[in-house]
Image (cartoon, helix red, strand yellow):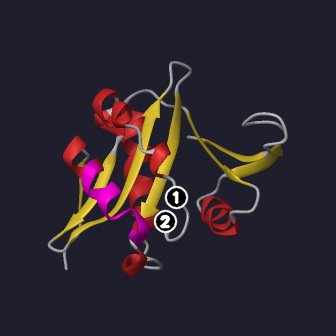
Amino acid sequence: MTVRIDLADVGDLHQVLEDHARYWGERDLRALHLTALVQEFGSTCLVARAEDGIRGYLLGFVTPHRTGYVHLIATREDTRGTGLGRTLSEAFTETARRQGAVRLKAITSVTNEGSIAFHRSLGFDDRVVEDYDGPGRARVVFTRELP
């Protein structure tokens, strides 16, 4: 089945939120799915669409400091291991580069082994930053310079 990478719109975000558990399982990350991200940074928010719906998505933006920030990236449980996450990441990289990004950045919790392994496989450097998300809330910060 053909998968196409498209720009996300608010309707796509609502669909993703309806199917939240298919992307995130038991973790409730709905509060991180900000409509404003799609409204204001729609040119860097992506969906992987197929006949059977949205298989994955990436919400991101480019900062004034020329950093392409990946806020969220997820694939549906039935598409994991297919390379779709990598495809979304590559599409975002090119989009961010066209908007002037010279580096990429993402964060995750220190216990999210899947996210850590995924970002490392994409060539990101990582470091734990204590109190990144508030007192006692360390995060793994990923960075990668763009050639």
In the rendered image, the vertical position of residue 19 relative to residue 147, given as above or below: below
- Please tell me which residue is depicted at 48% across the width and 44% down the height of the picture: 31
- Name the quadrant of the N terminus: bottom left
Name the image quarter holding residue 79: bottom left
The amino acid type of the residue labelled 1 equals Asp
| 10 Å crowding of disc 1: few (<14), some (14-19), many (20+) | few
x, y (%) of residue 24? Answer: 48, 65
In the rendered image, the vertical position of residue 9 relative to residue 40, given as above or below: below
x, y (%) of residue 62? Answer: 46, 30
Find out whether residue 20 is within the magenta segment. Answer: yes
Name the image quarter holding residue 48: bottom left
Find out whether residue 97 is within the magenta segment. Answer: no
Determine which residue is flagged by label 2. 24
x, y (%) of residue 139? Answer: 74, 46
Closer to us: 146 or 86: 86
Determine which residue is flagged by label 1. 28
The amino acid type of the residue labelled 2 equals Trp
Q: Nearer the viewer, mark 1 or mark 2?
A: 1
Name the image quarter holding residue 102: top right
The rendered magenta stretch, by its main secondary structure, is classed as: helix
Closer to us: 74 or 20: 20
In the rendered image, the vertical position of residue 118 relative to residue 59, given as above or below: below
What segment carries the magenta color? Answer: 14-22
Q: Are marks 1 and 2 in contact (CB under 8 Å)?
A: yes
x, y (%) of residue 28? Answer: 52, 58
- Please tell me which residue is depicted at 84% across the width and 41% down the height of the picture: 136
